Every structure is written in C-alpha cells, then in structure tokens.
Image (cartoon, grey):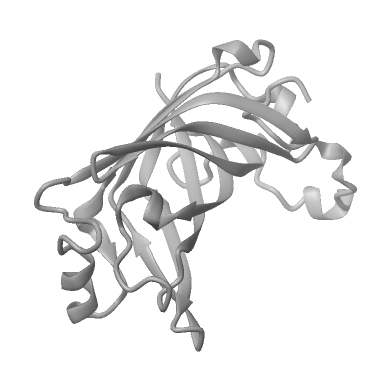
C-alpha cells in the first residue's frame, strides 16, 4: 500500500458484482485517492465509546462534536497529516443524569477542559486494508501517546452533495486512568473502546 493513511485496496477479495453497485466515480482503491486537503464532515464524524459497567454489561455512548483536518497523499506518506478537535461537552450516554455526571469533574470536567485534541505523529500500514495511526491525545490537560487502527472504506464523489469524499473507520482502546479519569475503578472499566467514523470532504 502506498499511502499508509489511505488504507484499503481492491485486493481484499471484493465481489466484482457488489463493487458494481457503488455509485459512479467511487473507488475502493486507496492509490486512486486524490492528494490534497480534507475536512471532516461534522454530520459524519462521531466517536462511539464503550466500557464495562460493573462487569454486568457493556455501556455505550457517543461524542458528537468532532472537527478534523487531514492532508492525504497516496504517493508520499510523509505528507500525511491529521488533527482532530473534540468538544467534550457533547459526550452523551443517552441518559440526562448520566450526561451531567460525565461532564462533572470526576470524568470529563468539561467546565475546565471543554476540548480534547488529537494530532497524528505516525502512520504505519498493517495490511492493504488497514493502518496504525499513532499520535498525541490531550484530554483533561494530560497528553499521552495513543494509537488507533484505521480502515479505508472508499473514496469518490458523494452521491448526495457531489463533493469528493474519503471515508474511514477506526478503533482504539484508551485507558481513562491515563488521563486522570479514575472514578469508580475498578468497578467501572478502565479500558474504553473507542470506535471512530469519518467522512472527509475535499477542500477546494
């Protein structure tokens, strides 16, 4: 694979008939991605998190205020850039009482730390379909190196807004205690599974 952040190729054994169902101008070949600047579509850039709840269940929530900028170049991996800003006040567990608790000092402390940031520092291909993206995550005023596994889905003209779009998914595991978020350990899980959704629009 040429562009480590681009992440997917036709050689995954995709059914040609299924590929034919894609909209015209859409490709799953990462080497065909247009080099240039991209911006995350705020309507399709969300973080879904989950952790163990007292060992009885896995609890899920989301963070919906996510902004990001990327520079992609399938021919020159050294030029790949990714920066993300997260509005911590958008954290939700789909329960008003829990939402208020998540924003309190025990957890995200959104009054003091209204944003978190991630800046990629390295992208390492792990297969034709995936790459490992490492970077600096700053949360609650603490910066740690974290990494996520990214998968390139497809790129091409979006059938709705006709904008050139590149789509990715991602997954990471983050220890909340690394960022001073150690309330109710070990009853509540320390490891938080983070799933990422991103559609990046070309910046003309």
For this rendering, which residue is in front, 22 or 178? Answer: 178
Determine whether 51 is above or below 5 in the image.
below
Which residue occupies 16% across, 71% down?
100
Residue furthest bottom as drawn: 56
In the image, residue 67 lies at what x, y percent?
Answer: 32, 39
Residue furthest left as drawn: 111
Determine whether 202 is above or below 19 in the image.
above
Which residue occupies 63% across, 44% down?
149
Q: Is residue 7 left or right of residue 56?
A: right
Query: Image quadrant for the N terminus?
Result: top right
In the image, residue 55 lies at what x, y percent?
Answer: 51, 84
Q: Is residue 136 left or right of residue 111?
A: right
For this rendering, which residue is in front, 163 or 56? Answer: 56
Query: Image quadrant for the C terminus?
Result: top left
Determine whether 16 is above or below 69 in the image.
below
In the image, residue 60 lies at what x, y percent?
Answer: 43, 73
For this rendering, which residue is in front, 41 or 161? Answer: 41
Image quarter of residue 142: top left
Q: Is residue 179 left or right of residue 51?
A: left
Q: Is residue 108 left or right of residue 133?
A: left
Which residue occupies 49% across, 56% down?
194
Residue furthest front as drawn: 186
Determine whether 38 is above or below 138 in the image.
above
Which residue occupies 88% across, 39% down?
11
Image quarter of residue 39: top left
In the image, residue 160 lies at what x, y percent?
Answer: 46, 47
**Numbered label tally:** 0
């Amino acid at each position: 694979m040429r562009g480590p952040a681009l992440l997917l190729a036709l050689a995954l054994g995709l059914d040609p008939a299924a590929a034919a169902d894609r909209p015209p101008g859409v490709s799953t070949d990462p080497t065909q991605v247009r080099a240039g600047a991209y911006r995350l579509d705020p309507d399709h850039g969300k973080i879904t998190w989950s952790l163990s709840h007292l060992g009885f269940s896995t609890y899920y929530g989301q963070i919906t205020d996510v902004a990001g900028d990327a520079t992609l170049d399938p021919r020159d991996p050294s030029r790949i850039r990714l920066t993300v800003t997260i509005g911590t006040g958008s954290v939700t567990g789909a329960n008003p009482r829990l939402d208020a608790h998540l924003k309190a000092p025990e957890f995200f402390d959104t009054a003091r730390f209204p944003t978190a940031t991630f800046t990629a520092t390295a992208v390492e291909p792990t297969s034709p379909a995936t790459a490992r993206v490492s970077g600096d995550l700053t949360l609650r005023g603490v910066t740690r190196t974290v990494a996520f596994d990214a998968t390139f889905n497809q790129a091409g003209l979006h059938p709705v807004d006709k904008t050139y779009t590149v789509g990715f998914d991602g997954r990471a595991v983050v220890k909340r205690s690394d960022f001073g978020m150690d309330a109710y350990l070990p009853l509540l899980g320390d490891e938080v599974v983070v799933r990422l959704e991103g559609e990046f629009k070309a910046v003309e």
